C-alpha cells in the first residue's frame, strides 16, 4: 500500500513539546516519556479507533517530533468525511496515514480514495504491521455499533500489532450507574432516556465497559497494567448534549412512541434547568479512565 502522503521533502523542525490540554492524553504522554528526555517518544504509533479529537492529538505529537510514523483507523462513515476534511488542512509531508476499515472485516480503504477497496491475502486489516504504541480511544465501547459481540476479540487482535515491549493505551468511560444519590441521579435518568431513544430508533447503543473488565482482559492476554481514573464533572451544557442525542432520534420513531418520548425529554429538560439553575453548577458522576498495558516479551506469541 502506498503512503497517503508524499514524504519527498524533509519535515519541518519539531516545535518545543507542550503537554496536551486533555488530561487523559497528557497522562499518556507522561507514561511514554523516558527518564532521559522531557519529550514522549511513541515511535511507530497506531490510533486504532480514530476521531477528530485523537487525530488532532496525533498531529500535535508529529509536529513536536514525538512520532516516527503513525496510522489511524476509523469505521464510521460520518467520521470518514470529517477525517478527509481534516486531512486537507494537514501538511503534505506528514508521516501519517488514515485508513477506513473495521477490525472484524477483511478490507480497508485509504481516506483519500474511499471508493477503492484494498484486499489482503490475510483477510485482515493492517496485515504484518507492528507498532511501538497503540491507542484505543473509547474504542471498546464503540465496537458494538460496528462489530457486535467482538469486544472480547479486539484486544487480542490489537496485541498482534505490538512490537516486543510495546504499549497499548485503552481510554474508556466507566458505565454510568443505575442510580446516584442527590442531584447526580439526573445523569442516570438521562443515560436511560438516551439509550431508550437510540434503541427505539433502531440503532445500537454505545456499550461502555468498566475499568475492571478492561484490566482483567488485558492481563489475561499477557499485559502488565497500570491505570488512572479521571472523575467526570457534568455541567448543564454537557448534560444537555446527552439529552440532545435522545432528541435527535425522535424523527426515527413511530407516532405514539415518538410523542411519548418527546414528553419525557421535555420533562427531563425542565429538571435539568432546575438542578443547574444559575449556570455554574457541576455534578461529579462517574469517571473516564486510561489503562496502560505493557506487553511482556514472553507473552508475545500467546
Image: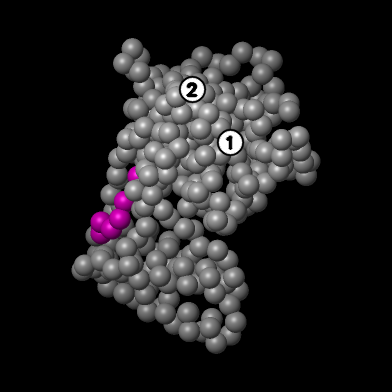
Q: Which residues are magenta?
A: 282-289
Q: Is residue 82 above or below residue 293?
A: below
Instruction: Give the image quarter of residue 19.
Output: top left
Label 2: few (<14), some or many (≥20) within 10 Å?
A: some
Q: Residue 62 at what x, y percent from top left?
A: 51, 24
> Which residue is drawn at the image coordinates 45% and 68% (left, top)?
194
Q: Of helix, strand and loop, which one carries label 2?
A: strand
> Which residue is drawn at the image coordinates 32% and 63% (left, top)?
177
Numbered circle sitting on residue 164: 2
Majority secondary structure in the magenta region: strand
Label 1: few (<14), some or many (≥20) within 10 Å?
A: many
Considering depth in this image, is 132 or 83 the residue closer to the camera? Answer: 132
Instruction: Give the image quarter of residue 290.
Output: top left
> Which residue is drawn at the image coordinates 61% and 24% (left, top)?
94
In-image side of 62 versus 117 (left or right): left
Q: Is residue 240 visible?
A: yes
In-image side of 201 versus 106 (left or right): left
The disc, 2 or 1, on the residue closer to the chain's N-terminal end is 1
Numbered circle sitting on residue 72: 1
Amino acid at each position: 500500500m502506498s503512503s497517503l502522503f508524499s514524504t519527498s521533502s524533509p519535515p519541518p523542525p519539531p516545535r518545543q513539546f507542550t503537554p496536551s490540554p486533555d488530561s487523559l492524553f497528557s497522562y499518556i504522554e507522561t507514561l511514554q516519556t523516558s527518564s532521559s528526555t522531557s519529550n514522549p517518544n511513541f515511535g511507530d504509533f497506531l490510533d486504532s479507533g480514530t476521531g477528530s479529537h485523537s487525530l488532532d492529538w496525533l498531529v500535535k505529537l508529529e509536529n513536536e517530533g514525538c512520532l516516527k510514523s503513525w496510522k489511524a483507523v476509523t469505521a464510521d462513515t460520518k467520521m470518514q468525511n470529517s477525517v478527509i476534511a481534516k486531512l486537507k488542512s494537514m501538511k503534505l509531508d506528514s508521516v501519517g496515514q488514515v485508513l477506513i476499515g473495521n477490525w472484524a472485516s477483511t478490507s480497508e480503504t485509504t481516506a483519500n480514495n474511499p471508493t477503492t477497496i484494498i484486499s489482503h491475502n490475510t483477510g485482515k486489516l493492517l496485515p504484518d504491521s507492528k507498532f511501538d504504541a497503540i491507542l484505543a480511544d473509547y474504542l471498546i465501547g464503540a465496537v458494538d455499533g460496528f462489530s457486535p459481540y467482538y469486544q472480547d476479540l479486539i484486544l487480542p487482535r490489537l496485541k498482534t500489532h505490538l512490537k516486543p515491549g510495546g504499549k497499548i493505551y485503552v481510554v474508556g468511560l466507566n458505565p454510568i450507574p443505575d442510580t446516584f444519590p442527590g442531584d447526580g441521579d439526573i445523569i442516570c435518568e438521562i443515560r436511560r432516556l438516551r439509550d431508550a431513544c437510540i434503541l427505539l430508533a433502531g440503532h445500537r447503543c454505545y456499550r461502555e465497559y468498566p475499568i475492571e473488565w478492561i484490566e482483567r482482559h488485558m492481563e489475561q492476554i499477557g499485559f502488565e497494567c497500570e491505570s488512572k481514573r479521571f472523575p467526570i464533572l457534568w455541567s448543564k451544557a454537557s448534560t444537555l448534549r446527552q439529552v440532545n442525542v435522545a432528541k435527535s432520534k425522535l424523527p426515527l420513531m413511530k407516532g405514539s412512541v415518538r410523542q411519548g418520548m418527546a414528553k419525557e425529554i421535555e420533562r427531563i429538560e425542565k429538571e435539568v434547568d432546575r438542578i443547574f439553575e444559575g449556570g455554574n453548577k457541576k455534578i461529579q458522576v462517574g469517571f473516564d479512565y486510561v489503562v496502560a498495558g505493557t506487553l511482556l516479551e514472553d507473552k508475545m506469541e500467546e
